[in-house]
């Protein structure tokens, strides 16, 4: 039994309900020293022919990313596929390609040398809180969720405008 869970992709699970938690534009992850690293914003056409590290087909963001490149007529070299934005960051850090990632997952890599830039058109990453369908108000869970929403709001407000981590309260 769990009081709360967090997921990126909502799936129907018996006796579980979900509520939206965040919608945040993804960022483009570039290896240190990449030719596009000096740009303020990366566009789909900029990544023509690049080795691209992609999310797995099971991730809803993958279809959104693929659609943007298809609509722009851009052909990428799909080099590696992984189910996690954090894994994309680790692979980008090794110089194996570029990728579009959830800025929350990218947060652990801000000091790694990876260059993160806004990506246009925006690819939205979604997060949801999950609860048992018999959920009763619990002050601890509600308080935790309030703090989580406040922290995530910093990403929503800054992800498209800055490439550094939003400052936490009291830090």
Image (cartoon, rainbow, N blue to C red):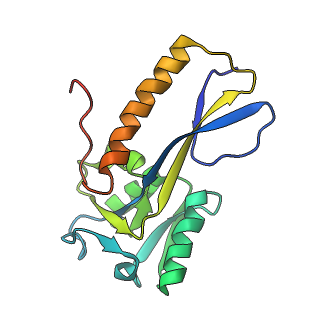
Give me the residue at 52% from left, 13% from top: 140
The percent position of residue 136, horizontal first and vertical second, equals 67, 16
Left or right of 38 in this view: 105: right
**Number of dots carrying numbers:** 0
Q: Residue furthest top?
A: 139
The answer to whether residue 75 of the structure is visible from this angle is: no
The residue at 39%/56% (across/down) is 89
Q: Quadrant of residue 25?
A: bottom left
Is 5 on the left-hand or right-hand side of 22? Answer: right
Q: Residue furthest left?
A: 38
Q: Position of residue 79 (x, y in %)?
A: 49, 73
Q: Position of residue 99 (x, y in %)?
A: 42, 65
Q: Residue furthest bottom?
A: 73
**From the image, which quarter does the N terminus lie in?**
top right
Q: Is residue 90 visible?
A: yes
85 to 132, vertically: above or below: below
Residue at figure coordinates x 46%, y 53% from the top left = 85
Q: Quadrant of residue 82?
A: bottom right
Taking the image as shown, residue 31 lies to the left or right of residue 57, namely left
Q: Quadrant of the C terminus?
A: top left
**Residue 47 vertical position relative to residue 13 in the rendered view, above or below:** below
46 w.r.t. 21: above or below? below
Please provide percent x and percent y for residue 83: 56, 55
Question: Which residue is located at x 18 percent, y 70 percent?
Answer: 38
């Amino acid at each position: 039994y769990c009081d709360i869970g967090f997921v990126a992709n909502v799936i129907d699970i018996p006796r579980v309900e979900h509520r939206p938690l965040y919608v945040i534009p993804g960022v483009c992850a570039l290896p240190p020293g990449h030719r596009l690293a000096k740009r303020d914003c990366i566009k789909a056409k900029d990544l023509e022919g690049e080795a691209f590290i992609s999310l797995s087909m099971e991730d809803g963001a993958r279809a959104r990313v693929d659609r943007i490149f298809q609509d722009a007529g851009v052909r990428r070299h799909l080099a590696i596929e992984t189910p996690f934005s954090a894994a994309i960051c680790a692979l980008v850090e090794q110089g194996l390609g570029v990728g579009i990632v959830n800025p929350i997952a990218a947060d652990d890599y801000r000091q790694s040398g990876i260059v993160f830039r806004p990506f246009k058109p925006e690819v939205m990453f979604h997060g949801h809180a999950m609860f048992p369908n018999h959920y009763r108000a619990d002050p601890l869970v509600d308080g935790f969720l309030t703090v989580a929403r406040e922290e995530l709001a910093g990403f929503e407000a800054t992800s498209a405008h800055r490439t550094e981590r939003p400052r936490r309260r009291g830090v």
